[in-house]
Amino acid sequence: MTINLQTLKCAECGSGMLQRTGLNQYVCAHCGSVSVVEDDVSDRLDRVLDQVKDAAAQRLNAEQGARQKQAIRTAALVLGGIACFVILTLALSSFVGNRRGNRPSPMAIVDKPIPVDLLKLVDVREVLTGGSQSAKLLVVARNETGKVLERPGLEATFYDGETKLGSDSETLPVDLLMPGESAAVLLDLPRGEGRVTRQELTVKRLSEPRGSVEGPSLAFSRVRLVQQGPNDLRLVGRLVNTREGVTIAGAQVLVTLYDDRGAVIGFGQGYAQASELKPGERSSTEVRLVRFGGSSVPVAAWDYRIGYSVTAGDGSRAAVRSAQRTVRTASGPEAFNPDLRMSTEDLLADDSERFDLAQLELLPLIPGLNTIRQRTYMTELVNRSKDVIAVTPSAVISRFDGNELDGTTRLDGLAYLYPGERFPVQVDPRRADRITQTRVEWKPLRKAALPGPRVPLEVRVEGTKAELGSVLLNFSQRFVYKAVTVKGSVKNPGTGIVRKPRVWVSLRDRQGQLTGFKSVDNLTAIAPGDSVPFEVRIEQQGRDFATVDTVYQTGD
């Protein structure tokens, strides 16, 4: 091999890959040719080859440095982008927070666990509830954590000695339990074999509400606690939203009953009828109470508290934390006859909405005989008012033979009694041969002004026919009685359909006294301008009839 000294390449193949393998000896790494040169040429070749290597190393270092600088510039751009995103996010959050500055700020989330032993169980006992006398475990819990608790829960495990009988768990009947407040809960005792000798109570994990806000407490504008029978208690209340610019949602009521020692003897939970109340709107609520401790223990005091939420502009809700929200009354319930049917509207009507009971008259009893010749009595309820309608009049009539109570008769079934109208009532003795006196217990009545809500109808009597009837008693006695068949029609002169018409047809003697009556309950709906016929057979209980009178009602 010869080396081209001008280009320092192998003269055989032209490769510049020359390696020194000995004294003045070089080998081409490409074709393997070997060349021997003089000493001075050898030194010069070594210096040139070293320069080539140094130049290659410098080029390699320069390329690596350029790549590192590019990587640093790329990382800097990424970090800068991240920093800009974080700054923009914080700026937007600050802007949105400023825009929502007029909204209640949510309560901070507390990560620190709340000690469960600070929910004190102050009253634990077995009780019998309601008329069914179902066995329950009563637990009264008091919040001594100093924090607002969200629906705290309990679990009870029951044992007969060392034998586990079962368990039950419940949450307290309030969405928020304020510091210092107490609430009662009932847990089911296990059924079946075994007797509960002990129980273990566990308080579930306690937590504070998230997203709740401070707000004023609510109270009913009108409220009544009513008792009808030993175990039939209910609270009715009217709630009005007096807050400006705030919508109340999900109003929840908890009512608690106490005896004269302050022990809990009953409670109940309910909700307002309306799910939301805008400013100025009102709604009512009715809470049925569970009574325990024995009906012989009178109610000495009771209280209620109202929990609620407020609705934000975006539709979200936040529970309201209210201090001193419990309203207490140191008296018992109002007692009414169990047979009276009273609606929430009847009980909560204002004084200006009341019908004056002095304008209602129950006429003296009229004696008569029924179809098997037994003593019976009739009377009439008369509206003496000139311009006021009695709405759903209802009463309980107690019958007496001397001083002995013979029973009661319920007066109801009429939606409206207009001025001057007479509503017939049958009063039959149960055991006594006579009725010497009566006592009337009225429900709270409402009134309406003329013309009133009743759809006007035209009731016409088109014919009467007196006849005799007979009845066989015990296949041994036959009784003959007088009856009257009355035919007529009911016309709808209005513009709307009347769906549930009902007519009472009364027979009167020559003195205008009631001698028999019957209701017509099978009338069909009446279209505008149409009429429907009716026919009714009435047993005559008193003297011979001379005239026929009618009273009607309509309703949906």
Image: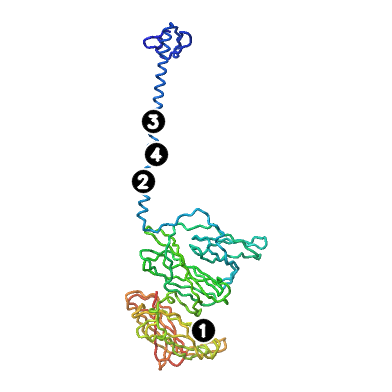
Q: Is residue 386 above or below residue 123?
A: below
The answer for how far apart the CA atoms under marks 1 and 4 are is 90 Å
For label 1, the residue is: 408
Q: Secondary structure at mark 2?
A: helix
The answer for how far apart the CA atoms under marks 3 and 2 are is 29 Å
Q: How is the image coloured?
A: rainbow
The answer for how far apart the CA atoms under marks 2 and 1 are is 80 Å
Bin the neighbour count of mark 1 within 10 Å (Cα to Cα): few under 14, some 14-19, many 20 and up: some
Please state which of residues 282 and 547 is positioned toward the viewer in this rendering: 282
In percent of the image, x 40 and y 64: which residue is there? Answer: 248
Q: Which mark is residue 79?
A: 4
In percent of the image, x 51 and y 64: which residue is there? Answer: 180
The answer for how far apart the CA atoms under marks 1 and 3 are is 105 Å
Q: Which mark is residue 248?
A: none
For label 3, the residue is: 69
Q: Secondary structure at mark 4?
A: helix
Report if the CB atoms under discs 2 and 1 are less than 8 Å apart. no
For label 2, the residue is: 88
| Residue 38 placement (x, y as % from top left) | 43, 5
Residue type highlighted by circle 1: Thr
Q: Earlier in the sequence, mark 3 or mark 2?
A: 3
